């Protein structure tokens, strides 16, 4: 059974170099945290050397990686440099995919803090470079995508009928202090807290009323939001009944918060390798909205593959989870077509 992994980190060498330079002039908890990672030759090689990961993919039976620039990506820089690096990263990744179209697909990088340029780069990456979606690493310098100034990016994504992978980032400077202890600011806790916050802001901010066809992909089985949707609906309805929306700066939504999550969001299993949460998400959202992912190189491929191979689901559900949903949602060519393109 074909195995497509849909949240796999990648970084061109130039990005790693630029980020390490940034750590010399910007001293924050995230730059110290990531400087520790990127400064290790083996971690840098895992992100930049696609030949290295092919060896692991072959050994462990992963057929394809959907590659996206590692967090925080080009959003770490100012808008001008971020835009330049996004174009460079997309061109570099397109070249790598062209070498192995049967093994790699791609998510385009954009710099949201230059929204019009980001929209143009999104269109170029999808229509000219053949990318399969876009990756945005959550907030950009503390600003979230519910702000209408970012909506040209959504307009472009809808026009291109392409999904946006909303990947976690470190909590913003406004909220990071309580997360800075015990290693909490990263994947241990802070990433999920930030990404789920971002999603709730987008829902309550009316993004999906404005863009009903917008497709958002979330890793880590939805960043914990599956468990919280009933509470969101309950509290929203309570405020609506009591006339409490306007004093809080909220507008009535066309649907309940959970409806947007069920209609506009897709989930991947990245970093989540226990069955009960997956069972819950399948029960809540169905087997057409969930895809396998590893979260390479931050998670262990062997563990993720062993987990998915051992699931006791029927063949049709397994096929959707392992590759059919990824092919449909991201427009990834079926295996036979990909092999023919590679020949």
Image (cartoon, rainbow, N blue to C red):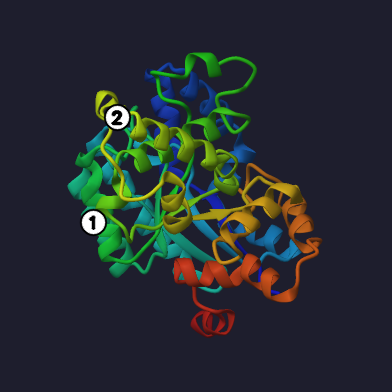
Asked if residue 186 is positioned above or below residue 213 in the image, the reply reads above
- The image position of residue 10, as x and y in percent, is 51, 49
Viewer-proximal residue, 124 or 92? 124
Mark 1 residue crowding within 10 angstroms, few (<14) / some (14–19) / many (20+): some
- The image position of residue 25, as x and y in percent, is 37, 19
Q: Residue at x 75, y 63 (%)?
A: 59
**Callout in the foreground (2, 1):** 2
Task: Mark 2 and mark 1 in contact? Answer it, CB < 8 Å.
Answer: no
Q: Considering only order in the chain, which callout, 1 or 2, is on the residue closer to the N terminus?
A: 1
Asked if residue 85 is positioned above or below residue 123 in the image, the reply reads above
- The image position of residue 52, as x and y in percent, is 64, 55
Viewer-proximal residue, 151 or 341? 151
Viewer-proximal residue, 182 or 61? 182
Q: Is residue 6 visible?
A: yes
Report helix, strand or loop for mark 1: helix
Distance (Cα) linking label 2 and label 1? 32 Å
Determine the image quadrant of residue 21. top left
- The image position of residue 42, as x and y in percent, is 64, 40
Q: Can residue 138 be seen in this view?
A: no
**Could you tell whether 160 is left or right of 163 in the image?**
left
Judging by the rendered image, the residue that carries numbered circle 2 is: 243
Q: Which mark is residue 155?
A: 1
Q: Residue at x 65, y 57 (%)?
A: 283
Q: Which residue is drawn at 49% across and 43% down?
A: 70
Mark 2 residue crowding within 10 angstroms, few (<14) / some (14–19) / many (20+): few
Determine the image quadrant of residue 83. top left
């Amino acid at each position: 059974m074909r195995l497509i992994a849909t949240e796999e980190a990648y970084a061109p060498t130039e990005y790693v170099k630029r980020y390490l330079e940034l750590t010399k002039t910007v001293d924050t908890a995230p730059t110290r945290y990531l400087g520790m990672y990127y400064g290790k030759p083996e971690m840098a090689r895992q992100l930049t050397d696609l030949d290295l990961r092919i060896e692991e993919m072959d050994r462990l039976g992963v057929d394809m990686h959907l590659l996206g620039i590692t967090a925080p990506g080009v959003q770490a820089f100012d808008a001008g440099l971020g835009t330049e690096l996004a174009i460079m990263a997309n061109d570099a990744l397109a070249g790598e995919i062209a070498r192995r179209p049967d093994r790699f697909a791609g998510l385009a990088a954009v710099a949201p803090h230059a929204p019009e340029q980001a929209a143009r780069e999104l269109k170029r990456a999808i229509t000219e470079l053949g990318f399969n979606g876009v990756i945005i690493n959550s907030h950009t310098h503390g600003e979230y995508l519910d702000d209408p100034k970012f909506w040209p990016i959504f307009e472009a994504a809808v026009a291109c009928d392409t999904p946006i992978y909303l990947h976690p980032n470190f909590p913003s400077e406004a909220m990071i202090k309580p997360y800075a202890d015990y290693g909490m600011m990263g994947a241990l806790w802070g990433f999920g807290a930030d990404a789920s916050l971002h999603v709730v802001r987008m829902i309550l901010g009316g993004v999906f009323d404005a863009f009903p066809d917008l497709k958002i992909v979330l890793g880590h089985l939805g960043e914990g939001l599956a468990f919280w949707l009933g509470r969101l609906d309950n509290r929203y309805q309570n405020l609506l009944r009591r006339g409490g929306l306007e004093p809080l700066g909220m507008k009535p939504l066309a649907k309940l918060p959970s409806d947007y999550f069920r209609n506009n969001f897709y989930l991947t299993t990245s970093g989540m390798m226990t069955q009960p949460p997956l069972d819950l998400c399948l029960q809540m959202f169905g087997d057409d909205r969930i895809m396998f992912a590893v979260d390479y190189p931050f998670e262990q491929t062997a563990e993720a593959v062993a987990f998915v191979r051992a699931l006791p689901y029927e063949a049709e559900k397994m096929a959707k989870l392992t590759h059919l949903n990824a092919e449909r949602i991201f427009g990834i060519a079926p295996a036979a077509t990909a092999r023919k393109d590679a020949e």
